[in-house]
Image (cartoon, rainbow, N blue to C red):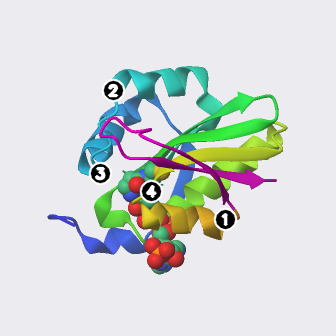
């Protein structure tokens, strides 16, 4: 992690709702993981889906975020999840996912779905650990032509 005091990695992770002030940090993370999402996507999420748009904070640093929404009355959908590269593999992605699943359940969802790049084995392994199972493939789902695996968790 460039120039960062590695001591913060041992500090507790706080998962909370995304606030407008988090936008800059979230866009920075998005760039670092080559997400390339438009800032308006983030603002739309925290304005319209405030309850399921989350950040994970470590010692005041935004270490990751999750954009989720209630896709249908009984289904939650994870649109985009990213963790700052220097903070990955420490359970932050897992924490964000567990929290949004808890929120989806509270909102009455019976299942949750998401799409993930065929090549993204790390994310697939995280979702599998949470009980998500592959239900299909969408060819050329991403703008660069890569296919998406569709995964669902029955809750
Ligand atoms: C995919 C992504 C969100 C995962 O976030 P993360 O915080 O690294 O995920 P976690 O740490 O919760 O879990 C990932 C790994 O850490 C391990 N892990 C979980 N908790 C841990 C802990 N407390 N200590 C050490 N390792 C841990 C998990 O076993 C898992 O290992 P694996 O990669 O070998 O399967 C992150 O890699 C990322 O932002 N990638 C780029 C964007 C992206 O691909 N997003 C997903 C789009 S669908």
Task: Check the image and name the residue furthest to the left.
Answer: 3
* Image: magenta residue range: 132-155
Q: Is residue 40 above or below residue 147?
A: above
Residue at numbered disc 4 = 118
Residue sitting at 33 percent across and 56 percent down? Answer: 84
Q: Position of residue 97 (x, y in %)?
A: 60, 55
Label 1: which secondary element: loop
Q: Which mark is residue 38?
A: 2
Q: Secondary structure at mark 2?
A: loop
Calculate the distance from the C-alpha at mark 3 to the C-alpha at mark 4: 16 Å
Q: Residue at x 59, y 61 (%)?
A: 127
Verify whether residue 54 appears in magenta. no
| Labelled pair 2, 1 in contact (Cβ < 8 Å) | no
Residue 33: give its label.
3
Bin the neighbour count of mark 4 within 10 Å (Cα to Cα): few under 14, some 14-19, many 20 and up. some
Measured Cα–Cα span from mark 3 to mark 1:
22 Å
The answer to whether residue 152 is above or below residue 20 is below
Dot 1 or dot 4: first in sequence order is 4
- Left or right, 155 with reference to 93: right
Q: Nearer the viewer, residue 141 or 109?
A: 141
Q: Please tell me how crowded label 3 is: few (under 14), some (14-19), or many (20+) other residues with Cα within 10 Å.
A: few
Residue 32: x and y, percent?
25, 50
Count the marks: how many? Answer: 4
Label ID, residue 130: 1
The answer to whether residue 2 is seen in the rendering is yes
For label 1, the crowd category at 10 Å Cα-Cα, with few meaning under 14, some 14 to 19 and many 20 or more, is some
Closest to the observer, 116 or 136: 136
> Looking at the image, is mark 3 or mark 1 earlier in the sequence?
3
């Amino acid at each position: 992690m460039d120039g960062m005091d590695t001591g913060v990695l041992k500090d507790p992770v706080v998962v909370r709702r995304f606030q407008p002030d988090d936008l800059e940090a979230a866009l920075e993370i998005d760039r670092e993981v080559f997400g390339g999402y438009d800032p308006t996507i983030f603002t739309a999420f925290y304005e319209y889906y405030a309850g399921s748009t989350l950040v994970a904070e470590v010692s005041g640093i935004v270490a990751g975020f999750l954009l989720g929404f209630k896709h249908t009355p009984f289904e939650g959908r994870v649109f985009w999840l990213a963790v700052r590269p220097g903070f990955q593999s420490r359970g932050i992605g897992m924490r964000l996912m567990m929290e949004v699943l808890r929120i989806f359940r509270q909102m009455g969802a019976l299942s949750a779905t998401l799409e993930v790049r065929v090549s993204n084995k790390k994310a697939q392994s995280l979702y599998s650990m949470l009980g998500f199972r592959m239900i299909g493939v969408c060819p050329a789902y991403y703008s660069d032509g890569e296919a998406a695996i569709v995964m669902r968790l029955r809750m």
